[in-house]
Image: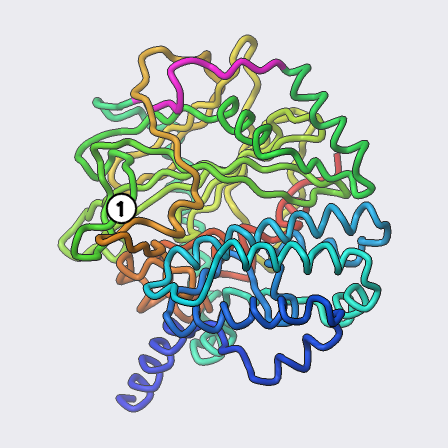
């Protein structure tokens, strides 16, 4: 038994320290199909990534593969590959994945301790040349369909095998159901005596529903995929316009959302003197439509311990709230997880949406309806003290008494300032914040999730212990709802 325990602990440690695979020397053969005029650019981008790996600063929010060195992918973009049949759809798709790669190169270059020999502007110019060339390159599209990139699951099958998963899930199901009932009961429990309201802006963004609808109609008419690929400016305006108000029970500084930063010694912390909301966006496929999603993240210094040994408590905690807009740009679905991927809750905001029957093969999120309210334009999200659990969602009129949240781009977390003009990502090369590990990882590992309870980067959130589900799965919401 001691030997078995040592094997399990060793394997668990390995699973939590797996790094991106090194770039093989044979990659040069994979790049030969590029036209000779841009082959040197392809080699240059691969060489840059080699240096990034050697210095241990590879960003993994999106997938990069050597075969397509000028592009980066999320689960949504990979799901579109079979649908890229027209020149217009290919161009729109390339624009999207090239943009993901551009942001990734920027943060990796900024995080390099030694940048000698690499000019970010020259790399970007090479990437643009490759993107322009591959748009009309039949060989590229043939290779893409024959060898599509694949994002690995955030579940470890060997852990489920060693952990006797069929038995473990049977034993855990009652406890999971009990925890869900506890969370649901929070929605009818009274608020704590001391609460603080936080909002992203003191005055509402000057947008009208007609203007928003025109944006979405125009982009869909211009897309063979029906993809509302808005401009950065339009997304920023929408993100500001729809930003929720957060009503947070506040018992200590652990309950004050703050700005993520590094101490001079290189350790991350939450600066609670600067209440901050981090914003980002993504896209999802929902019953044949492509919908825009606005994401809002809060970070807290700690999850407060409730006992001397609390397996869920520890440094760092956070809430990720995602608002999915319908085809006309109106609030449609709200869902939320903690930054560890736990506590997935889904709210239907449209009265015509109906939840589908539960699939018993996979752990279901908590599901609820939020009724509309006449004259109310802002979603208010109530957050509990200590454990930062969602305990309320409702429509309200804009509040003028809220504390203002400093709004920052979530992408800044991928490259935070250190001393002496250096930068470092909040997340490691597994997409994890290892300073936030929890004791729960030692008994939840049989369910296959790497280091349960650890805060992690967007793109790495496993949201179910029974079955498999990722928060960024391209079609994650569709199975939860009946087709409208």
Give the residue drawn at x 52%, y 24%: 242
Q: Nearer the viewer, residue 205 or 402?
A: 205
Percent x, y of residue 8: 35, 81
**How many numbered markers are drawn?**
1
Percent x, y of residue 374: 56, 9
Quarter of the image that includes the C terminus = top right
Give the residue drawn at x 40%, y 74%: 54
The secondary structure type at the circle numbered 1 is: strand
Q: Nearer the viewer, residue 409 or 369?
A: 409
User: Residue beneath label 1, please?
Assistant: 261
Percent x, y of residue 91: 76, 48
Q: Which range is magenta? A: 197-208
Q: Nearer the viewer, residue 91 or 374?
A: 91
Left or right, residue 172 beside residue 475? left
Left or right, residue 87 beside residue 159? right
On screen, residue 65 above or below 369: below
Give the residue drawn at x 34%, y 66%: 114
């Amino acid at each position: 038994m001691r030997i078995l325990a040592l094997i399990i602990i060793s394997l668990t440690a390995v699973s939590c320290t797996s790094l991106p695979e090194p770039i093989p020397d044979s990659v040069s053969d994979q790049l030969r199909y590029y036209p000779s005029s841009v082959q040197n650019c392809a080699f240059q981008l691969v060489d840059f990534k080699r240096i990034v790996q050697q210095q241990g600063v590879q960003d993994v929010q999106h997938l990069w593969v050597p075969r397509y060195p000028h592009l980066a992918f999320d689960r949504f973009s990979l799901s579109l590959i079979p649908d890229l049949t027209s020149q217009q759809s290919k161009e729109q798709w390339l624009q999207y994945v090239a943009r993901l790669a551009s942001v990734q190169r920027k943060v990796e270059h900024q995080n390099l301790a030694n940048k000698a020999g690499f000019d970010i502007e020259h790399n970007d110019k090479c990437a643009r040349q490759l993107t322009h060339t591959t748009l009309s390159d039949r060989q590229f599209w043939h290779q893409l369909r024959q060898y599509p990139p694949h994002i690995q699951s955030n579940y470890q099958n060997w852990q489920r095998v060693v952990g006797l998963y069929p038995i473990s899930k049977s034993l855990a199901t009652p406890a999971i159901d009990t925890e869900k009932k506890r969370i649901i009961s929070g929605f009818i429990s009274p608020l704590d005596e001391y609460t603080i309201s936080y909002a992203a802006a003191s005055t509402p963004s000057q947008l009208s529903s007609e203007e928003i609808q025109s944006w979405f109609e125009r982009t869909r008419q211009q897309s063979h995929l029906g993809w509302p690929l808005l401009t950065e400016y339009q997304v920023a305006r929408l993100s500001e316009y729809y930003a929720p108000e957060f009503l947070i029970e506040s018992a200590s500084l652990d309950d004050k959302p703050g700005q993520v930063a590094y101490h001079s010694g290189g350790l991350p912390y939450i600066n609670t003197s600067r209440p901050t909301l981090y914003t980002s966006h993504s896209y999802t496929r929902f019953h044949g439509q492509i919908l825009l999603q606005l994401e809002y993240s809060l970070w807290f210094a700690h999850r407060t311990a409730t006992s001397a040994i609390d397996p869920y408590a520890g440094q760092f905690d956070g809430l990720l709230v995602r608002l999915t807009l319908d085809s006309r740009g109106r609030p449609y679905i709200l869902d939320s997880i903690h930054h560890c991927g736990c506590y997935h809750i889904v709210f239907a905001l449209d009265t015509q949406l109906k939840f589908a029957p539960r699939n018993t093969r996979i752990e279901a999120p908590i599901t609820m309806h939020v009724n509309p309210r006449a004259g109310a334009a802002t979603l208010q999200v109530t957050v509990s003290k200590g454990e930062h659990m969602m305990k309320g969602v409702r429509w309200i009129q804009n509040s003028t008494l809220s504390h203002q949240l400093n709004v920052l781009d979530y992408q800044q977390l991928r490259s935070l300032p250190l001393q002496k003009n250096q930068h470092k990502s909040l997340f490691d090369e597994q997409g994890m914040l290892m300073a936030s590990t929890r004791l729960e990882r030692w008994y939840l590992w049989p369910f296959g999730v790497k280091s349960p309870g650890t805060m992690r980067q967007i793109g790495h959130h496993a949201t179910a212990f029974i079955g498999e589900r990722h928060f960024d799965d391209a079609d994650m919401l569709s199975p939860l709802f009946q087709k409208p």
